[in-house]
Amino acid sequence: MPLIVGLLVLMGLFATADLYLNKLDTKPVLNWRDSADSVASADTPKEKEVVIDSQFSLDGKLAGYTVVSQMQTSQIFEKIDLSNIKNVSIYRNELKKEVEAVEGDESEVTKSPSIYLYELQGPENQGALTYLNAKLQFIAQINAVTETLNETGDYGNNSFYFNNKNYENTAFILTQIGDDLFGFQYQKSEGDKAFEDVKSVIQLLVTEQSIN
């Protein structure tokens, strides 16, 4: 008799334990991955605004031109990637100038075609090395059939023309002035006037660099 009672008690304990375990199985399992992601996404910082640390201020004046837009970039002339050159910041400034067109008795003020001024800020006292590194990047990336470099010492400390047969109406010049490089992209259709304006800007930069 005591043996039968003991067996009944033992069976009751097993039944109770089984019921409890089954209830545990029915509880929802927390997805820690989803939980962590939702918290992380809520705390993800917003993308930082790029600070333009150009030598030229937006809306600033430069040899009769106004800086109408600025952007940071890793290329020059929107073709040659210079991101492999260390410790160099690259900015593109769009320059516009108001011109007065006279036709008969009427005059109209319009804006000239843009001159794009690329600015490569390099390490102090390493302007010649920055220029050399930039030139090597041009040599490595240009199309030997349609693109050539024509080095000249007429502008700044060092300079060269970048000639592209696919853009025969556009001129490209890169010049070193002190520690920094400046690239100019302008339309040849403006004749010598645009080129004279570019030379005026270069002379202004050379003068400012010699003063500083």
Image (cartoon, helix red, strand yellow):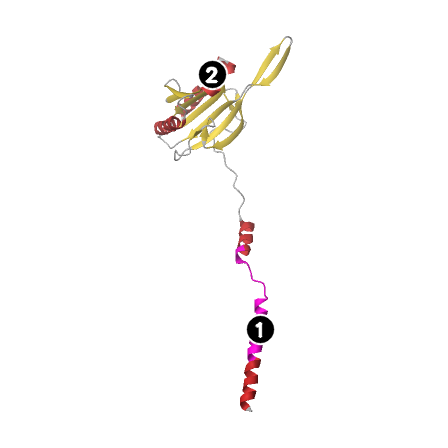
Q: How many marks?
A: 2
Which residue extends farthest bottom?
Answer: 1
In what element is the residue under mark 2?
helix
Q: Is residue 171 left or right of residue 35?
A: left
Residue 23, visible in the rendered structure: yes
The circle drawn on residue 170 is none
Residue at 53%, 89% in the rendered image:
3
Residue 195 is marked as: 2
Q: How far is mark 2 from mark 1, CA to CA? A: 89 Å
**Which quadrant would the N terminus be assigned to in this image?**
bottom right
Q: Tell me the amino acid under the disc marked 1.
A: Tyr
Q: Are marks 2 and 1 in contact (CB under 8 Å)?
A: no
Amino acid tagged 2: Phe
Report the mark closest to the observer, 2 or 1: 1
Tag 1 residue = 20
Which corner quadrant of the image does residue 17 belong to? Answer: bottom right
Above/below status of 21 relative to 196: below
Specify whether residue 156 is in view: no
- Magenta segment's dominant SS is helix
| Helix, strand or loop status at disc 1 | helix
Q: Nearer the viewer, residue 30 or 111?
A: 30
- Position of residue 26 measured from the top left corner of the image (x, y, whole percent): 59, 66
The magenta-colored residue range is 13-33
Q: Nearer the viewer, residue 168 or 71?
A: 168
